[in-house]
Image (cartoon, rainbow, N blue to C red):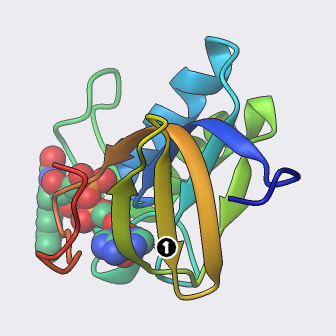
Amino acid sequence: MHQEQHIHDVTIIGGGPAGLFATFYGGMRGMDIHLIESLPDLGGQLTALYPEKYIYDVAGFPNVKAKTLVKQLEEQALAFDPDISLDTAVTHVEKLDDKLFQITTTKGVYFSKTVIINRRSWCLPPTSSAY
Ligand SMILES: Cc1cc2nc3c(=O)[nH]c(=O)nc-3n(C[C@H](O)[C@H](O)[C@H](O)COP(=O)(O)OP(=O)(O)OC[C@H]3O[C@@H](n4cnc5c(N)ncnc54)[C@H](O)[C@@H]3O)c2cc1C
């Protein structure tokens, strides 16, 4: 690891609704967050598969369009100025000897004290040694 390389407190892999809320929550708790999403846009399945569909099972919303929910989640997630890498797929996660995680992506290598893997549509190769 290069000495000048930034080390995030938490790296969240996957920018769907779970990753977006984790980004907000970590930021609210004063953590230095990095969110990595392989697609060019945030929102996961809501953005990629059904932006116009109404959702009826989100607490506090009798009904809400998927794209509207994503907009709200994004606004909430950005509140604490996280680092966000879009169009960036994680290809390998490795726990280093010094207890840091090394996260290899299609756009570079990052380091983090902890990693949250959004597993819903996870596609990390089985060679990763983070488990
Ligand atoms: C047609 C349809 C209708 C649905 N309707 C409802 C509904 O009405 N109510 C409801 O509660 N649920 C509904 N769901 C389910 C809901 O969309 C999912 O439960 C939800 O999207 C899961 O959120 P998530 O953040 O866990 O994962 P996802 O939304 O799957 O997001 C995961 C993100 O991780 C990214 N990712 C994956 N691998 C990598 C990698 N290696 N590197 C970087 N990024 C990566 C993906 O690109 C994706 O953006 C529906 C699903 C579908 C398909």
Question: Height in image: 59 above or below 2?
Answer: above
Q: In the image shown, does 72 or 19 lie closer to the viewer?
A: 19
Q: Is residue 59 above or below residue 12?
A: above
Q: Position of residue 63 (x, y in %)?
A: 30, 42
Residue shown at 53%/88% (left/top)?
106
Residue toward you, 78 or 10: 10
- In the picture, residue 112 is in which quadrant? top right
Residue 81 appears left or right of 55: right
Dividing the image into 4 quarters, which one contains the N terminus? bottom right
Work out whether residue 52 can be spotted: no
Residue 15 lies, with reference to residue 20, above or below; the image says below
Q: Which residue is drawn at 64% across and 34% down?
A: 76
Farthest-out residue, top? 29
Q: What is the secondary structure assignment of the residue under circle 1?
A: strand
Q: Position of residue 32 (x, y in %)?
A: 70, 31
Q: Residue at x 43, y 34 (%)?
A: 99
Horizontal side, residue 30 vs residue 36: left or right: right
Q: Name the residue under label 1.
A: 104
Q: What residue type is labelled 1?
A: Thr
Judged left or right of residue 50, residue 39 is right
Q: Which residue is painted at 58% across and 84% down in the image? A: 87
Within the displayed image, which quadrant is ligand 1 positioned in? bottom left
Position in image of residue 96 (x %, y %): 42, 49
Residue extending farthest front: 97
Total numbered badges shown on the rendered structure: 1
Q: Categorize mark 1 by other alpha carbons within 10 Å: few (<14), some (14-19), many (20+).
A: some
The image shows residue 86 at horizontal and vertical percentages of 62, 75
Q: In this view, does 39 lie to the left or right of 116?
A: right
